[in-house]
Amino acid sequence: MRSFIIEGGRRLEGEIRASGAKNAILPIMAATLLTREECVIHDVPDLLDVGTMADILTGLGAKVRFGRDGAGRRRYVRISANSLTGCEVSAELMGDMRSSIVVMGPLLARLGKARVSRPGGCSLGPRPINFHLRGFETLGTRIRESHGFVDAETPGLVGREITLDFPSVTTTENLIMAAIHADGRTVIRNAAREPEVVDLQNFLIAMGGRVDGAGSDTVTVTGGKRLHGAEHTVIPDRIEIGTYLAAAAITSGDVRVTNVVPQHLDAVTAKLREAGVALEQGNDHIRVLPGTRLKPVDVKTMPYPGYPTDLGPPVMSMMCFAEGTSLITENIFEKRFAHAEELSRMGGSVEVLSRLAVVRGTGRLSGARVRAPDLRAGAALVLAGLGADGTTTVDHAHHIERGYEHMDDKLGHLGAFVRKVEN
């Protein structure tokens, strides 16, 4: 078990560069299964989830090689899926990461069959894969479920019109990748609009695919095109960026985050300004200016372009340092507030009423030993530790390393005392 030890009370100052987006790189890696030719992806974050996806692709017969370029030593990955050896994804790997489900669409498109188990990942409440399966059935796939496994097979995918019950990101991505080899045109309505879906579209276009409309609620895929290898750079991680902006605000710091697409964070920066955080914004950076005095705010998480659910936990920690009552309404996941009890160990006052969290901020927290229940909650507890009096130990830090590249090093570069230890 890894833990992060944080000495609180240090003001963050300096500049860091945002990593490539976790939620973009995983479906893009899965999309390399759609071609026999080699693909090269740049700005690949060093995350546990990226390693899991690499293991999944390797288990299917693809060759996956990581390296670092000469400019800034940023990571890239070369993936060649010339000869796939199977269509079944290891149940153990599926259990490690919910995003593993995005290999199902490419496997159906490439091989006409796929066998997967129910995916795992963070325990955020029911996240059924029924949206995926219904979409695949509409495209001409026969689905059989037994003993926790899903077997899917098709004699050939056929383009259809699909209307999603909910604008699920991974469902939208999975159906786009399946439809890329379908016969005819597929129209996906009520599609997710997240920037990560747009990034996948751009990668597929670079491979020779025909995809239009990503970023809107209607995506059109014209299938039947043979895809080739491509080179692509992943977009910046807007969730990581938002997390470090909140960290700077908590410590009244002066932090400049580069490699940013500011419009990806419009809902986040609007809420930060409402909370009293002074920001400077450029074409590719956002800076938190010093002297923040946090004010309570109300937040409602929504699909993009609304306030992102993944930044609900960091804003909860931030509101503990504001004096007054804040309301956080979670509209995506039922169990997003698992860290509220851990914040109470640090002196926080958070009352959870189903999907509503009432945060009664007192302006301070005290260091304590806490446990990261999931990825974003773990990051939120690190943020709480940065602003708390004394020492905070966050156990189960492997959750954090699933989605934040070298968080201890980046915070250390800004002047924080964060040490990673093996227990």
Image: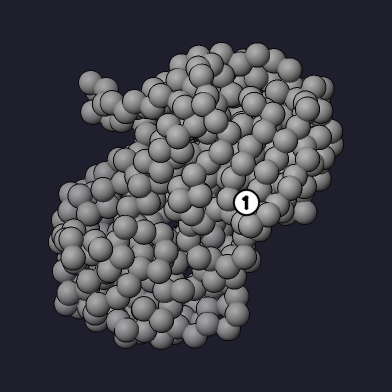
Identify the residue shown where x is 67% and y is 33%.
113
Where residue 274 appears, as percent x and y from the top left, is: 48, 65
Whether residue 265 appears in this view of the structure is: no
User: In which quarter of the view is residue 87 placed?
Assistant: top right
Residue sitting farthest toward the front: 147
363 displayed left or right of 269: left
Question: Please, is residue 401 above or below residue 8 in the view?
Answer: above
Q: Secondary structure at mark 1?
A: strand
375 displayed left or right of 174: left
Whether residue 354 appears in this view of the structure is: yes
Where residue 184 appears, as percent x and y from the top left, is: 82, 22
Q: Identify which amino acid the numbered label 1 is placed on.
A: Phe
Question: Please, is residue 5 above or below residue 77 in the view?
Answer: below
User: In which quarter of the view is residue 176 placed?
Assistant: top right
328 displayed left or right of 411: right
Tell which of 92 and 194 is nearer to you.
Answer: 92
Question: Please, is residue 242 above or below residue 384 in the view?
Answer: above
Quadrant that contains the C terminus: bottom left
Identify the residue shown where x is 40% and y is 69%.
373
Tell which of 414 and 193 is nearer to you.
Answer: 193
User: In which quarter of the view is residue 126 placed?
Assistant: bottom right
86 displayed left or right of 181: left
Tell which of 274 and 249 is nearer to you.
Answer: 249
* Figure label count: 1
Where residue 253 appears, as percent x and y from the top left, is: 25, 59
Where residue 347 appears, as percent x and y from the top left, is: 32, 85
Residue designated by label 1: 149
